Amino acid sequence: MPKLDRTLIGTVLEPVVAEVEKGEIRQFADAIGATDPIHTDLEAAQAAGYPNLVAPPTLVFCLAQRNAEPTEGMVKLGFDVAKLLHGEQHFEYFHPVCAGDTITLSTRIEDIYDKKGGLLEFMVQKTDAVNRDGALCATMTAVVVQRHG
């Protein structure tokens, strides 16, 4: 019953390159209720030792979605989006993302496996967010689930 192509394991998807802007950092901070002034006040960010406004950590997820229609990409990978679930999301943070940064987000398909006799298929994707200086800012691991039947 499994339908997802296991040969996709190890595939690196087309990277997304995103310029991080002050306005989107402020808007995202407001949307999630992040009240630390390093996200909205340049002087506060610089006083804390940052070169510019600091993005709230999960903004990298939004950056990864910037240049693509997410469902289109899932269809290309063999998913039926009507039966698609977002199973898990994990983040690891290593270096702050600041306004003015250029972030390259590279996604690799880490694993595809099934459960319940193939009624559920899982795809594990790992995305690295790297700044223009080559510093790894964050790693995101997502698990998406395809239901069958």
Image (tube, helix red, strand yellow):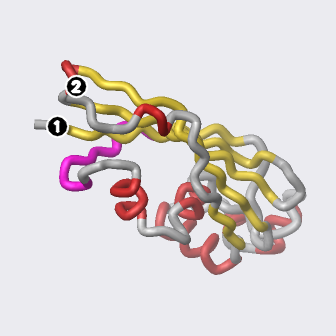
- Looking at the rendered structure, the kind of residue marked 1 is His
Is label 2 in a helix, a strand or a loop? Answer: helix
The mark found on residue 118 in the picture is 2
Q: Quadrant of the C terminus?
A: top left
> Where, by quadrant of the figure, is residue 81 drawn?
bottom left
Percent from the top left, x then y, of residue 48? 85, 58
Write down the residue under mark 1. Answer: 148
| Residue at image coords 67%, 46% | 128
The mark found on residue 76 in the picture is none
Of all residues, the one furthest to the bottom in this rendering is: 23
**Vertical comparison of 94 with 49: above or below:** above
Compare residues 10 and 46 and report the one nearer the observer.
10
> Where, by quadrant of the figure, is residue 19 drawn?
bottom right
| Residue at image coords 55%, 75% | 27
- Looking at the rendered structure, the kind of residue marked 2 is Gly
- Along the horizontal axis of the image, is 13 left or right of 22? left
| Residue at image coords 35%, 33% | 122
- Along the horizontal axis of the image, is 21 left or right of 72? right
Percent from the top left, x then y, of residue 77? 40, 50
Rounded to the nearest angstrom, the CA distance separating label 1 from label 2 is 7 Å
Magenta highlight: main SS: strand
- Along the horizontal axis of the image, is 87 left or right of 91? left
Residue 11 highlighted magenta (yes or no): no
Asked whether the residues under the numbered discs 1 and 2 touch, taking CB atoms below 8 Å apart as contact, a structural biologist would say yes
Is label 1 in a helix, a strand or a loop? Answer: loop
Residue 85 highlighted magenta (yes or no): yes
